[in-house]
Amino acid sequence: MSHVSEAEGRRFQLILIKPSHYDDDGYVIRWWRAMIPSNSLAALYGIAADCAERKVLGPDVSIDITVIDETNTRIDFPALLRMFSRHDNFGLVALVGVQSNQFPRALDIARPFRAVGIPVALGGFHVSGCLAMLDSKAVELDACREMGISMFAGEAEGRLDAVLRDAATGRLAPIYNFINDLPGLDGTPVPFLPKENVAHTFGLSTSFDAGRGCPYQCSFCTIINVQGRKSRFRSADDIEKLVRMNWAQGVHKFFITDDNFARNKEWEAIFDRLIELREKDGIPLGLMIQVDTLCHKIPNFIEKAKRAGVTRVFIGLENVNPDNLAAAKKHQNKITEYRKMLLAWKAQGIMTLAGYILGFPADTPETIRRDIAIIQHELPVDIVEFFVLTPLPGSEDHQKLWKSGVEMAADLNVYDVEHVCTAHPGMSREAWENIYREAWQLYYSPEHMQTLLRRAAATGVPLGSLIKLLVSFATMVPLENVHPLQSGLLRLKRPSERRPGMKRVHPLIFWPQFIWETARKHVALAGAIVRLAATAYRISRDPASKVYMDQALMPVGADDEETLDLFIKTAGGTAAVAHVKRVAALTRGTPAV
């Protein structure tokens, strides 16, 4: 958990904390093993370790780095305060990668440190997004000023040195704003976390960004306004360096966090280097990447992804209704390409995960149910991740509502893409919330999960790997009332970790209730695992499983556009097909039908 320099002299205590956020009952969401590693934490640790090695505070000052990801590690405030006290409060608490839903918790973490005069800095998407899209006092940023918390906007490569020096000399500035001066990434310190931190994530997986920025203009997205629309990349040499650093400590599974790795101009050089590390050096890489819906059109991209070790791919599908995609400026998503793209990944035996947003203007509970049925029947996607359309601070959607004075949820804790934060033109708040919860039950029905396992067996997707994801995505919302992406293994709580302002439950009531709830949930989990494993076993023993075929796995046919509900059930789908035909006719020089 700590990086300690061996030099004598003064010791600057740098505490890097990635905050969690509160659940609906007011408890910090924390797990024995968390699902998703924090790349912000890895990036900051890599930069901070480089600062310590270069002695940026002077030859007689060491920098001791402590790393805490609150999603999987409890913050021991008394122990940290005692540590600071031993060093005359010489140091800095850095709240890292703070999203809007984590901002209230981040302020609560900061309070005991600020109460004794310890410097605190806060960075991440909330601060950066608000300063990029709104004014400098918007969306609770004044709370930082009132508490004396320094705000950091932008990226820390090449900038952390100055922040550490200011903290060491007691001159921490109220704001460090680099949002309009984004650094290059080539040759900068690479993201890295010690194994003792990585061990707290499920499957001993860590993360890195091979690039930042995105050229698209999706109105719900914060990335384009925080990381910019001009893409910046790490070199293949940098990627090899971080892979070897991790492999030296036995870590070989990575989530590449680029919002769209397919648009990373260095993708081929990076894949080629990873292929070399995997096939020649024997490093058993397991990778998850994020791509767009047109990645299959890039020659050799999917084939090289397979050889590089990609086992899972997340695709920003977002919706199957072109009218909704157009409303969100998601013009790059072409529903006429969805099946071709998904089948291309299936051909390589790679598991597909798709993000799907509920609450676009044309959505109703009825159309959402219809569209989920279309996905189940006609698209060969494995895992669908449902999200509530949320005006996240830092996005164009939020900026428009904020400037227009439209009412939005006042509590930032609910800006987690699971809660309704503003009104919908065609659904009540209750209807929207209900269909969000129902969507999980509809897609992850026992019948469809059996279909997904049959498709996996037919296309070479490992059944065991798919079962792990199905258990999480089918159970987390009904059992834990949290999105699967912020889930983990064995939920941990303490009565002392309840949100300020909410009544503290007496330990004699809290602990028996917590133990009972934990036992009940794990009995339900065990049942789900047994049922899915039994189904998978039967499928694997069935000789016919290798030749299983259904509509979703059928090769793309010439008559798809006239027969599939994906194209004929919405006006937007019909228009998309007509557009493709017009383009094809013009290309061939023949009249369109």
Image (tube, rainbow, N blue to C red):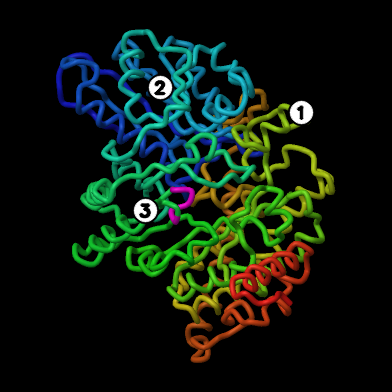
The secondary element bearing badge 3 is classed as strand
Question: Would you say 557 lies left or right of 167 here?
Answer: right
The quarter of the image holding the N terminus is: top left
Question: Would you say 304 lies left or right of 330 here?
Answer: left
The secondary element bearing badge 1 is classed as helix
In the rendered image of this protein, does residue 449 appear above or below residue 405? below
Would you say residue 97 sits in the magenta stretch?
no
Confirm or deny contact between disc 2 and disc 1 (CB under 8 A). Answer: no
Q: Which residue is mark 1?
A: 404
Q: Earlier in the sequence, mark 3 or mark 1?
A: 3
Instruction: Find the distance from the CA under tag 2 to the CA under tag 3.
Output: 27 Å
**Magenta segment boundaries in residue numbering:** 258-262
Would you say residue 520 is visible in this rendering?
no
Q: Which residue is mark 3?
A: 254
In the rendered image of this protein, does residue 583 appear above or below residue 217? below
In the rendered image of this protein, does residue 33 appear above or below residue 61? below
Q: Nearer the viewer, residue 204 or 588?
A: 588
The quarter of the image holding the C terminus is: bottom right
| Residue type at tag 1 | Ser
Q: Quadrant of residue 319?
A: bottom right
At horizontal 27% and vertical 25% (from top left) the residue drawn is 64
Label the magenta part by its dominant secondary structure: loop
Q: Which residue is mark 2?
A: 93
The secondary element bearing badge 2 is classed as strand
Q: Earlier in the sequence, mark 2 or mark 3?
A: 2
In the rendered image of this protein, does residue 272 appear above or below residue 422? below
| Residue type at tag 2 | Val
